[in-house]
Image: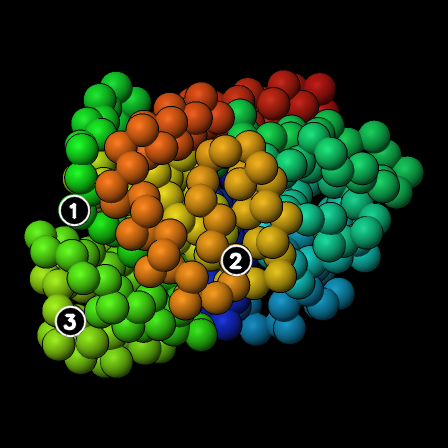
Amino acid sequence: MKLLFRTDGNATIGLGHVMRCLALAQAAREAGHSSIFVMTPNEEKISDRLQEEHCTVISMKARPGSREDATETANLAREHGADWIIVDGYQFDGDYQKAIREGDVPLLFIDDYGHAKQYAADIILNQNFYAEEMEYQSDGISPQLLLGPQYALLRQEFVQWKRHDRLITEEATKILISMGGADAENTTGRILQCLQNLDRTGLEITIVSGAANPHKKLLEKAAVISRHPTHLLFNVTNMAALMAEADIGISAGGSTCYELLYMGLPAIVFITADNQERNVHALERGHAIVGAGRNADTLTHLLKSLLSDQSKRGALSMKGRGIVDGLGCSRVLSAMQLTHGKCQ
């Protein structure tokens, strides 16, 4: 199959949509398929990363989510002989999906919280913990629903750690902070400030950020003056290895949550956008994470407790591994192949 992805990533919307599409593209390549990414202009390093993963990148100038965008995407799919169009982003509504389907190429729509109201996709994928509670209204078709963390899209770097045996130490010392590829509000900086109030010796902090982060210089200065040894990393391709080395993760409430769960890394998770709220609350109710809400000032208390609570960290780790098994991309590709076969 040839897959055409329509998604975007930048400092405003972050990189989560691009990275989970990349996960599916990686799995597709492993299965002998090819991928094209159609995107509005973005950070050069984002396109570079996709091209390093053997994906073709095409830039479009239409306003994201517009009728012109949908028409151009559908035309590109026909021009390149795509078997599927995969759309991921909150700017793409029900009308956009209908316009895409006018091109007669099957559509897979990646959703999080039902923002489109009406759906016109052949397959709707929602990997979130609460997804099975969602009721999708479709417009004249009966979409196949792939709902829940069993369909979590993990990049190949994570799948390789399937048999990782995590050691839960008596005292946690290694903290990994990952607030997404953009972190427009610099939540990372506020977290690092809070950690300066943590009167613990032996702590080691690793901060991971992405190509779209506009606060790089501020973070570099904060890392230098931190009371705890702090390593600042950008655009990493070994996130799974970094999670394997850490004792506790601190994260935003997006797709990174499912990477943390898969790796069995006990995590404190912040809500940094309205669309993360339901996800964080659901995972917290499921005893899979420690929810920190929206206020970074809560971190010191939560972290101080978790650092010394070996039993709780062990329970969080076990719970996470029971939720995400790393086979999500394979399941999604199987569903796409089955539907594609019916369409031929």
Which residue carries the number 3 mark?
Answer: 226
**Picture quadrant where residue 267 is located:** top left
Residue contact between numbered discs 3 and 1, judged by CB atoms under 8 Å: no
Residue contact between numbered discs 3 and 2, judged by CB atoms under 8 Å: no
Mark 3 Cα within 10 Å, few/some/many (few <14, many 20+)?
Answer: some
Tell me how far mark 3 sits from mark 2, CA to CA: 24 Å
Which residue carries the number 1 mark?
Answer: 173
Q: Is residue 232 left or right of residue 139?
A: left
Q: Earlier in the sequence, mark 2 or mark 1?
A: 1
Residue 3 in the image: state x and y as whole percent: 52, 39
Nearer to me, 75 or 33 = 33
What's the residue at 56%, 63% (across, down)?
Answer: 273
- Disc 1 residue type? Thr
Q: Earlier in the sequence, mark 3 or mark 1?
A: 1
SS of the residue at dot 2?
A: loop
Residue 68 in the image: state x and y as whole percent: 71, 67
Q: Is residue 316 left or right of residue 161?
A: right
Which residue carries the number 2 mark?
Answer: 293
